Image (cartoon, rainbow, N blue to C red):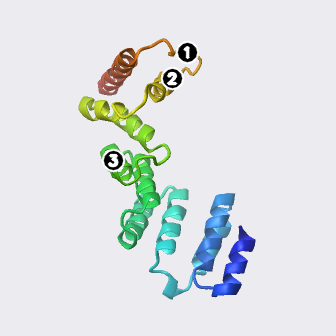
Amino acid sequence: MMKLIDKKEVAFGSTGILAKRAFVYINKGDVEKAEELFLQIPEPEKDTLDYYMLEGELAFQHDDYVQAEVAYMKAALLSEGNEDIIDRLANISVAQEKYEQAAAYLEELLKIAPDFPSAKSRLAFIRFEIGSKEPFDEIMAQFSDEELRSLLNLIMGNEDTDFSGYSRDKILIRLNEARENRVLFKNIKY
């Protein structure tokens, strides 16, 4: 990937190259090197989509969710409807335990990109965590029977259980029971 970035730099100049290199280092797990490059980004390149996304990702890597959210919101202003930005904002909201906000981002994401990887299942987990029946039922209606079986396996925490003989109605009953039990468990005062 770095060779491709080097070729782009030779062909088109160095504008935006530091941010691209920093993203490569983040993907390699070298956050320290990414931060070094981030700090070298010249002032004229700081009001760009790549800059704000990099700033947000670095803040997220350091569990600074408020700064990450601010940076990704700035990026969203520059690129409305950007699927990756909305996805990251949903992740940041989950990390902050702002589940309603995360659900709103994921719903927005599903309107823009109905097949966005994992968005539907993440929304189901968030609706499960929140415990609201109607929104939970709405997202469950969007799942195929096989997706519901996989979700039930994940929620029950036992991937060895075979739910293949369960009808859609029986799976939905079990999922609703698990959701209701989760709500009761969360409301128990110690």
Circle 3 residue: 107
Q: Residue at x 49, y 67 (%)?
A: 53
**Amino acid under label 3?**
Glu
Q: Which mark is residue 153?
A: 2
Query: Mark 2 or mark 3, which has the lower sequence index?
Result: 3
Q: Tell me residue 180's x, y (percent).
A: 31, 22
Query: Mark 3 or mark 1, which has the lower sequence index?
Result: 3
Q: Tell me residue 115's x, y (percent).
A: 45, 46
Q: Secondary structure at mark 2?
A: helix
Q: Residue at x 42, y 40 (%)?
A: 120
How far apart are the two marked residues, 1 and 2, measured between alpha carbons?
A: 7 Å
**Amino acid under label 1?**
Thr
Evaluate if marks 2 and 3 touch, with contact meaning CB atoms under 8 Å apart. no
Q: Secondary structure at mark 3?
A: helix
Evaluate if marks 1 and 2 touch, with contact meaning CB atoms under 8 Å apart. yes
How many C-alpha atoms fall within 10 Å of the one at disc 2: few (<14), some, or many (≥20)?
Answer: some
How many C-alpha atoms fall within 10 Å of the one at disc 3: few (<14), some, or many (≥20)?
Answer: some
Evaluate if marks 3 and 1 touch, with contact meaning CB atoms under 8 Å apart. no
**Amino acid under label 2?**
Asn
Q: Which mark is residue 161?
A: 1
Q: Residue at x 37, y 54 (%)?
A: 112
Q: Tell me residue 117's x, y (percent).
A: 50, 46
Q: Does residue 62 appear in this view?
A: no
How far apart are the two marked residues, 3 and 1, measured between alpha carbons?
A: 30 Å
Q: Residue at x 68, y 69 (%)?
A: 33
Q: Does residue 114 appear in this view?
A: yes
